[in-house]
Image: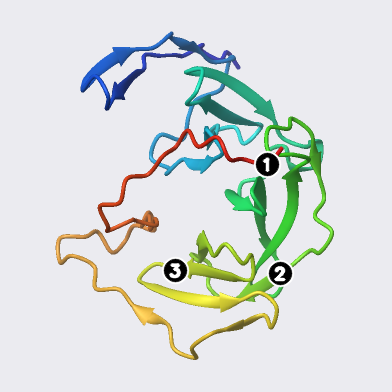
Amino acid sequence: MQYKKFTVVCEGFDSDLFAWKRLDHVILPKGEFLQISSVPVSNNRFLHWLTTSNKNVFRFCMKTETWSLLPLPNDLLYSSSLVLTNYEGKLGIIRWRPKSGRELKWTWVLDSTFGKSWVNPKEEKSIVEEDKFVKPVWLHPSNDVILMAGFDWVGLYNMKTNNRMKPQRFKVSLPYSFDYTSSSVNYFPFRSDYEKLDLNEDDVET
């Protein structure tokens, strides 16, 4: 099988100059592409995406405006159900795998804020949900509460007790025009306030 090389043309918006700026092109390895539809995980001056092969994390440094690839641990290569998140100020990975339903487990976190090596968290947490479409959406900064979403519902879970915080799932009313034969429903966190967000904060721990 032959793989094509992809080049990504990127522009960033400079809010100080109120203008777009052309960044260096990104040439990805053969067989790799970005999961453009996914929401990037922001962590201490970096934006992170998983690549489509689930072999690398694609990182953009907002301070230097440069790109890099961060390989995933070998035991996660080609896993189909990986999600990036923030864990104790570092980039973390959680994985779904079958176990009487769908099981959410911590697997790896970066060894430091700007690290390139992966380590196992000291305390592995997990929850189980009987729904083939369910997936994690948002992790609370406490690392104990997570928002899960199915095809047409969302719910909060306490990872310490492995239970929903409310017995009922919150039903989501999808548009009438939505294709209900499709399973591609994406939920993502959204900030609804107008507070200025500094993505280049200097007070980060290393």
Q: Residue at x 67, y 80 (%)?
A: 162
Going by the numbered disc 2, the residue's amino acid type is Ser
Residue on which the image places disc 1: 205
Q: Earlier in the sequence, mark 1 or mark 2?
A: 2
Against 186, residue 102 (above or below) is below
Check disc 1 and report its element: helix, strand or loop.
loop
Q: Nearer the viewer, mark 2 or mark 3?
A: 2
Q: CA–CA distance between discs 2 and 3?
A: 17 Å
Q: Determine which of the numbered discs, if any, sits on residue 86 in the image.
A: none
- Of residue 90 and residue 158, the one placed in the foreground of this image is 90
Q: Residue at x 27, y 27 (%)?
A: 15
- Of residue 51 and residue 189, the one placed in the foreground of this image is 189
Q: Earlier in the sequence, mark 3 or mark 1?
A: 3
- Of residue 10 and residue 77, the one placed in the foreground of this image is 10
On the rendered structure, is 156 left or right of 80? left
Q: Within the image, what quadrant is residue 69 found in?
A: top right
Check disc 3 and report its element: helix, strand or loop.
loop
Residue on which the image places disc 2: 126
Quadrant occupied by the N terminus: top right
On the rendered structure, is 4 left or right of 162? left
Residue 176 in the image: x percent, y percent? 15, 66
Residue 189 in the image: x percent, y percent? 39, 57
Residue on which the image places disc 3: 150
Q: CA–CA distance between discs 3 and 1?
A: 35 Å
Q: Earlier in the sequence, mark 2 or mark 3?
A: 2
Going by the numbered disc 1, the residue's amino acid type is Glu
Check disc 2 and report its element: helix, strand or loop.
strand
